[in-house]
Amino acid sequence: MPTALALSPHLDDAVFSAGGLLTTLAAGGWRVVMATIFTQSVPAPQGFALACQLDKGLAPDIDYMALRRAEDDAAAEALGLAAPRHLPFREAPHRGYACAPELFADVRADDAIDRDIAPALADLIAAESPDLLLAPQAVGGHVDHVQLVRALRSLAPAAPILWWRDFPYTVREATPKEPLAPLFADLPARAFAFETEAQARKLASCAAYASQIGFQFGGRDGLAERLAREAGTERYRLTGTLPQPFPLADAA
């Protein structure tokens, strides 16, 4: 049984960007492991980190990351996946990034989280022995996405990698920020279109992130409308060669 390992910066990124592929692989007999890097609970958050919680209508005493990990469990179940993996690293607001614009600016000089992530990724890859990796291109420029890409590239894993285009950052601006675009420009582009059932599973999985879809999409209806505009297609860049046989051909 082939294994796919999806490396998600946050608790929703893999599903938003690659949920169609993940559920299709699982339905096709693949073992699919979804692992999220930045999931650590931080007691008594302060400043911008606390604001990120309060602006979603959550009281300050709620364990925000525990709530999000539970949403991730439900999202994985909706895709037909086993329980996801949650790695114990802190999101950027807990690492000194003090406002929303800083999340999408240059990585701070004192932020070396990629060096901490890399050995944890190496251990995870060794344990899961994936035939295929999935990871972000860091479209949108979120520093956590950038740091994950840096960490993974430093390992030069042997498995092929499908680098997803980070949704919904891909659709927020006509020309989204792509700080790492030169790393992917020469890699072959791949696009996969999914059947109605896979699209429905992806919608249900995305909707499981109830704490996020309000500010991301305006609610479930906005999420459904935005996904419909993607026409059931996900886009990637490929490092290496896909395992054969692969259950999907490129979309026309």
Image (spheres, rainbow, N blue to C red):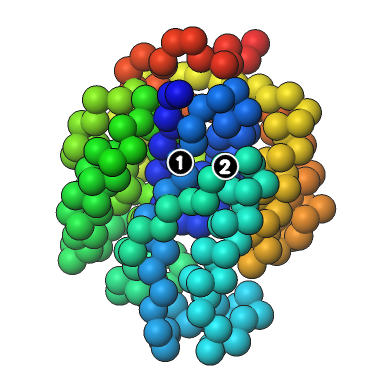
Task: Report how far apart the C-alphas of labels 2 and 1 lie in the structure.
Answer: 7 Å
Secondary structure beneath label 2: loop
Residue displayed at 76% across by 60% down? 219
Picture layout, residue 43 above or below residue 157: below
Q: Earlier in the sequence, mark 2 or mark 1?
A: 1
Label 1 crowd (10 A; few <14 / some 14-19 / many >=20): many
Picture layout, residue 215 above or below residue 74: below
Task: Out of 173 and 247, give the one closest to the viewer.
Answer: 247
Secondary structure beneath label 1: strand
Picture layout, residue 115 above or below residue 138: below
How far from the left and from the top, in percent, is residue 237?
43, 25
> Could you tell me the amino acid type at mark 1?
Val
Residue displayed at 66% across by 80% down? 57
Label for residue 81? 2
Q: Is residue 219 left or right of residue 202?
A: right
What residue would you read off at disc 1?
33
Label 2 crowd (10 A; few <14 / some 14-19 / many >=20): many
Picture layout, residue 57 above or below residue 128: below
Instruction: Check whether the beta carbons of the residues at disc 2 and disc 1 lie within 8 A of each other.
Output: yes
